[in-house]
Image: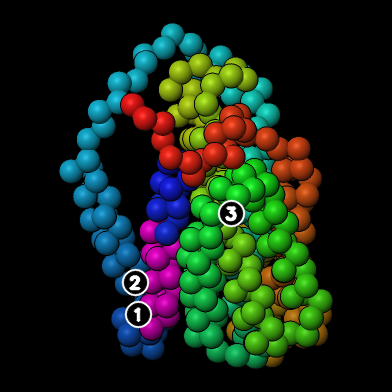
Amino acid sequence: MRLRLATSRMVGATLGSLLVSITTLPMVDWLGHGNRQAGFALYMVVVACVVGGLLWLPSRFCHERVATDGGDLTVRARVAGLLVNRGWRRLTGAMLLTMLGSTFLFGALVYDVRYVLHDSDHMAGWLLGLVSLMVLAGCGLSLPLAGRWGTAPVMRGGTLAAGGVLLVAYMLPARVEVLGISLALFGLCVGICNPVCFTLLAHCMDGGDGFSGTHTVGLAWALNSTASKMAFDVGGSLLAGVLAASGLVSGVGVQSVHAQAGIHAGFLLLPALLYLLAGGVVLRYFAPQNPVEAVNSTASPPPT
C-alpha cells in the first residue's frame, strides 16, 4: 500500500514537472514579448498563484482523522533517537547525494545544450520534458519490480544504473541523439527509484532503533526533506563555482574549449559520480526496518 501511494504521488509530481518543462520557455517568451527577464518574473507570478490555489484545495477539503500522541520527550531526546537509526541515516545521505547530482545535471543542461551541443534553449526544454516523461514510465515499473526483487535492491540497483548511464554518456561523443537516449534511460532509472525511496523512508520509521511516537516520525520526515532541499542550494553554488573555474564567460556565444569541458563535466561526470557514490557506498549495506514488509509491499492485505 505504501508503494502504491508513493507511486501515485510521484506520478502526479512527474506530470507537473513535465508540464512545467514543456511550457516554461514558450510562456516566458510570450509573457515577456522577447524580454526574458520580464517574462520569467511574470511566469513566476502565474506559477505562484496556481500553486497557492492547489495548496488551498487540500487545506479546505481534506481533514486528518488520526490521533497523535502528545509525548513527553524533549526535542534533544527525539533527535538523539533519530540519529541512531542507521537505515534513516543511510537513506537520507543517499537522497542528499542524488539531489545534489540532479542539481548539477539539470542546472548545467541548458549550458551544455547551448555551448557544447550548439543547439537552442528550446531543445533543453524538450530534453527536460523527455526526462520527466521517462520518470513517469519508471514510476509505472517501480511497483512490479519491487514486488519481484524487494524495495531496497530496486533502490540500490536503480541508483547505480542512473549513475552508470550518465558516466557512459560522458564518455560518448557529445551529440544531441546520444544525450537524448542517455537522459531517457536516466529518467527511467530515477522514476523506478522515486516511489521505492519514499516507501523505504516509511519503513525506516516503523519503530525500533530509538524511535518513539509519531512526533519523532514527523521530525524524521522534516529533517530528511530539509537535507534534500539543502542539496539544491549547495548544488547550485557548487555548479556556479565549477562553471566559473572552467572559464565560462557570460553573454558570449562561443565558449573556450576549457569552458566546454568544464560544462560537460559538471553536467554529466559529477552527477554520475554522486549517483554511483550513493548507490555503491551509502546504500551498499542498507536494509529497511521491516524487510518482510519491504519484499511483500505489493501483496494483498490480510482479511479483517
Q: Which residue is mark 2?
A: 43
Q: Which residue is mark 1?
A: 27
Instruction: Identify which amino acid the numbered label 3 is placed on.
Output: Leu
Instruction: Work out whether 34 lies above or below 270.
Output: below
Residue 13: in magenta span: yes
Q: Nearer the viewer, mark 3 or mark 2?
A: 3
Q: Which residue is mark 3?
A: 145
Q: Which residues are magenta?
A: 12-26
Q: Is residue 63 visible?
A: yes
The residue drawn where x is 54% and y is 21% is 207
Distance Cα–Cα, label 3 vs label 2: 39 Å
- State the SS at label 1: helix
Instruction: Identify which amino acid the numbered label 1 is placed on.
Output: Met
Mark 3 or 1, nearer chain start: 1
The residue drawn where x is 50% and y is 67% is 137
Report the quarter where the C terminus lies: top left
Q: Is residue 225 visible?
A: no
